[in-house]
Image: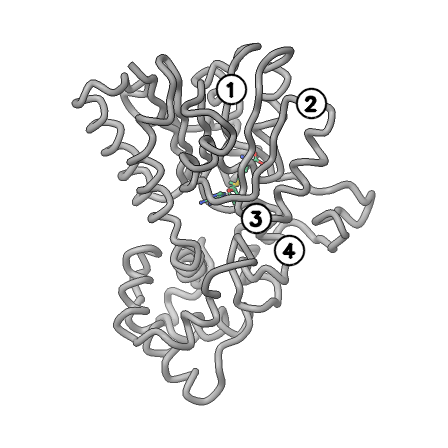
Amino acid sequence: MMWDGAAVNVCESESGVMDPSDATPIWHQPVMTAEVLSYLRPSSRAVIVDGTVGTAGHSMTIAPRLLPDGLLICLDRDHGALTLARQRLTEFQPHVTFIHENYRQLPAVLRQLGRECVDGILLDLGMSTFQVDTPERGFSFLHEGPLDMRMDQGQGTTAETLVNTLPADDLAQMLEILGEERFARRIAQRMVQERRIHPLTTTTQLARLIVQAVPAGARHGRLHPATRTFQALRMAVNDELGALEAFLAALPSLLAPQGRAVVITFHSLEDRMVKRAFVQGKERGEWTVLTKKCVRPSDEECQRNPRARSAKLRAVERA
Ligand SMILES: C[S@@+](CC[C@H](N)C(=O)[O-])C[C@H]1O[C@@H](n2cnc3c(N)ncnc32)[C@H](O)[C@@H]1O
């Protein structure tokens, strides 16, 4: 069985993840780029924030539309991703600014830049190919690596700390809520048993333990048995729901009149949060919801880029 995400063989270079055959960086394939552009409507004088720039897939399509008088403000909490984005967007200087920061700090970032609000904001949540395919970041159960999973390696608690210190009930709850993992309790109990003997330190050690913890009949499905646990750990380590919640609360004050926000989610909990915040803001008269239903990628895009399958896009326009 070839599990999802097992596709690319990569090696590391100073500037990021490189394809060994031609030493070209492997960029994250952005999802729904045409839809993003049509909802964001970047124009030649606009100030747009890409709050999750990653390796700049979306930003590469937004930046040319901001010339000659616009500005693109790119944030990422991952230093490595931001370095690659900076290299890739060099030709658009001085119309691009890069900030190593969590997008939940966007109000403070804009204040520091002398701005209160902007014409457009894009969030493309989740992790990038760059992160998954860098084994030492610990995001992938397919590559041997330390259980890190921090997007910002300069701060925060690693996945290793969580799996070795949380009580079994808390681990199970985390896997149930963030991973929607059916076998959360069995996996949590197995982690606690194992860590009494050896600390859990590597991705493949944890993946093996999960395979053993789930019933034999659940070991060979479409998803690798470790997929949901790894997703839950990543979301917990990076407090992904907390960042989104803070952003959604601040969003009305961040958009200029007629300014637009576009959010792409890959997890049902995140999509529910975005949907609820957008409906509540509409009821308060803060904006118009531009996407009555969430927008999904075309079949053709899903075939070309399987990661797009779970993407949902929602957009609002400030009143
Ligand atoms: C799906 S990737 C974005 C890909 C990008 N749109 C592209 O086309 O290359 C998500 C990125 O968001 C970043 N990220 C996730 N949560 C973040 C947060 N709270 N603040 C800033 N960046 C975040 C991750 O580090 C990752 O690089």
Rendered location of residue 82, percent (x, y): 62, 42
The quarter of the rendered structure image containing the N terminus is bottom right
Residue at x 33%, y 42% (from the top left corner): 246
Q: Which mark is residue 78?
A: 3
Rendered location of residue 95, percent (x, y): 64, 22
Q: Cβ of disc 2 within 8 Å of ligand 1?
A: no
Label 4 near label 1: C-beta < 8 Å? Answer: no
Considering the numbered disc 2 on the image, is that residue within a helix, a strand or a loop? helix
The quarter of the rendered structure image containing the C terminus is top left
| Sooner in the amino-acid sequence: mark 3 or mark 1 | 1
Label 1 near label 2: C-beta < 8 Å? Answer: no
Mark 2 neighbour class, 10 Å CA radius: few under 14, some 14 to 19, many 20 or more: some
Residue at x 41%, y 25% (from the top left corner): 116
Label 2, on which residue? Answer: 92
> Which residue lies most toward the right here?
22
| Sooner in the amino-acid sequence: mark 2 or mark 1 | 1
Kind of residue indicated by mark 2: Phe
Res 291 quadrant in image: top left
Considering the numbered disc 4 on the image, is that residue within a helix, a strand or a loop? loop
Kind of residue indicated by mark 3: Asp
Kind of residue indicated by mark 4: Thr
Label 4 near label 2: C-beta < 8 Å? Answer: no
Q: CA distance from mark 2 to mark 3?
A: 21 Å
Q: Which mark is residue 134?
A: 4
Residue 241 or residue 67, whichever sits in front: 67
Considering the numbered disc 1 on the image, is that residue within a helix, a strand or a loop? strand
Q: CA distance from mark 4 to mark 3?
A: 12 Å
Q: CA distance from mark 3 to mark 1?
A: 22 Å
Label 1, on which residue? Answer: 47
